[in-house]
Image: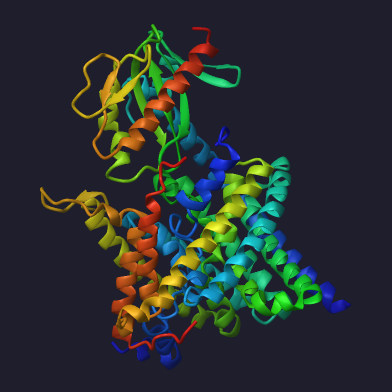
Amino acid sequence: MIDKIKMIGFVLVFGVFWSTALVAVDTMTGPRIEKYLLEKKRKKVLEALVIPYEADTIEEVFTTNVKAEEIDGKTIYTAEDGSIAFEFSGPASQGPISGIIALSPDKEAIKGIAMIQQNETPGLGSRVLAADNLINFRDKKVVPKLLIVAAGTASADNEVDAITGATLTSKALEKNINKNVQATKTLIGQ
Amino acid sequence: MGETSLLSIFITALLIQNVALYYLLGMCPFVALSRSLTTAFGMGAAVIFVVTLTSSANWAIYQVLEATGSQIIQYIVFIIVIAACVQLVEMIMERFFPALQASFGIFLPLITVNCTVLFISLKVTTVDNLSYIQAVVYSISAAIGFWLAMIMVAAIYEKLDLIGKVPKGLQGPGIIMIITGIIALAFMGFSGMV
Amino acid sequence: MNLKEIFGKKGAKTIKNGIWREHPISSATLGICSALAISNKVENAIAMSAGVIFVLILTAIIISLLRKIIPSRVRIIIYMITIASGVTIVDLALKAYWPTVSEAMGPYVPLIITNCIIMGRAEAFFVQNPPKLALIDALANGLAYTYTLMAIAIFREIFAFGTLLGVKITPAGWVDWVVLAAPAGAFFVLGVFLWITRTLAGVEPPGKG
């Protein structure tokens, strides 16, 4: 009986010691981690809204230029010129993707897109979601719908070239953008 | 992953993001036991059972951890729960199902340190934050996916002698890796199904 | 500079065994879980190796120091608590000081807990040996793990992305072997790696099933 108590006692003391140690480490690293996550979100919003910033002026630039408000659980970021940005997400070929998309003040064209998370095939699907390809989406119209068409055939102002060999990711992006834009526009009453 | 249907969770876990072939987990037992169909079968069955049990338990416990703000000890708690569940399963099998214990009982202790079990518990809580039903469906499908991968590799390995002689250094773990790589490539074709 | 002179006879044997003969990755094929998943970029491999070495050392010291008072029947739980705590610390440290790598490695960091090497050494060595030897063993196993992981990562990053630690080193006109960036590629590279090391170390092939 004594042995059993000793055993359990040892494990408990050991467990409590380590839990305390971990709580200490957590308090030390917590603020840094939170700051990083907040900055990350803000960076993406600024990127989508095409507002320039420096590494150490993110907070400043964000607070002066962008206002965040919650409508029905969705956060909408409004810039000074009236453009809005919000998070979009949905399934793609290798799993979910998410990012921030910004619309022009008249809500009819894309101001910019910044990806937050994606797991697409490196070298193929990933290229569709890379920053240098997302630039092609700027000023493209989302009304009636954004269309991603075969590489080299984009003509209308709501069409963007796809990347050959990355059809699935392109289609997924198109679907997710249209769906999220529609939903948000309905949400904010436009 | 709020709006994903149960069916899409099932197919994704089974084929597209297969725990062994896409996330590359559970390789220790995978390599050791994919050499014969019978062991592959047994290990896979044990994994399905243990995974579903432990991830349900850990899901519930995680809700408590979240409610009390003590997620910091999540890893410690999860791994102990997994070890405890496996011990429990072993004891129950020994007492009530001795025949079953004889056929796949030896795999159970191995499962405690199997990355797949911990991974699935983590995925349904912190990574994807699923609801209970989604968590259960995900666990079962992921485990079946693991089992499927093991059986396919074992089946091919057993027939290798018919094709030619495997070089000495490649026998065992080496050739298992290559076979698994080919199957993983094949599974890549499933992407986009959902 | 004879190994024997620096570490003593037992120490030298421990090192040789840890790094070559009982090489965790090749002859025992342990610990490859995490090795495969994040081995497509050298940066990730460095972070993962650092994490594993840290947990190995922490576990070695703690378990070895306490080895005389750990009740035998609960020793596995004690290993688990130690390893899980060590990994939690690594996870937090990565998230705070190296966040891009932490994001790239995602859920693989907590999987260090289930890394067979650490548990295996704790039971087979740390709990039966004094801290100095345990530390040497931990470092030897950690180094073995590191060089395997780095070998695979260097190969994969160069051929799949054309870069090394993010710096482009392949000549223009080189077509990346993208398949090596996908998980399937990891299997092929590891398979060949195992072939080479097992042949060189003269390891006997395993019996049937």
Q: Nearer the viewer, residue A43 or C116?
A: C116
Residue A174 vertical position relative to residue C194 in the rendered view, above or below? above
Q: Residue C70 appears at what percent x and percent y?
A: 70, 77
Q: Residue at x 68, y 49 (%)?
A: B59
Q: Give the quarter of the image for residue A171.
A: top left
The answer to whether residue B128 is visible is: no
Q: Give the quarter of the image for residue B147.
A: bottom right
The answer to whether residue C84 is visible is: yes
Q: Nearer the viewer, residue C190 or B6?
A: B6
Q: Residue at x 50, y 73 (%)?
A: C117
Residue B94 vertical position relative to residue C201 in the rendered view, above or below? above
Residue C103 vertical position relative to residue C157 in the rendered view, above or below? above
Q: Residue at x 62, y 61 (%)?
A: B48
Look at the image and tell me in which quarter the N terminus of chain C lies.
bottom left
Residue A84 vertical position relative to residue B122 in the rendered view, above or below? above
Q: Residue C124 appears at what percent x and percent y?
A: 56, 82
Q: Residue C114 appears at what percent x and percent y?
A: 55, 65
Q: Residue at x 32, y 28 (%)?
A: A54
Check the image and name the residue furthest to the front: B162
Q: Residue A158 appears at what percent x and percent y?
A: 30, 16
Left or right: where C177 falls relative to A59: left
Q: Nearer the viewer, residue B53 or A113?
A: B53
Left or right: where A129 falls relative to B84: left
Q: How is the image coloured?
A: rainbow
Check the image and name the residue furthest to the right: A1
Left or right: where A136 falls relative to A81: left
Q: Nearer the viewer, residue C103 or C130?
A: C103
Instruction: State the count of labels.
Output: 0
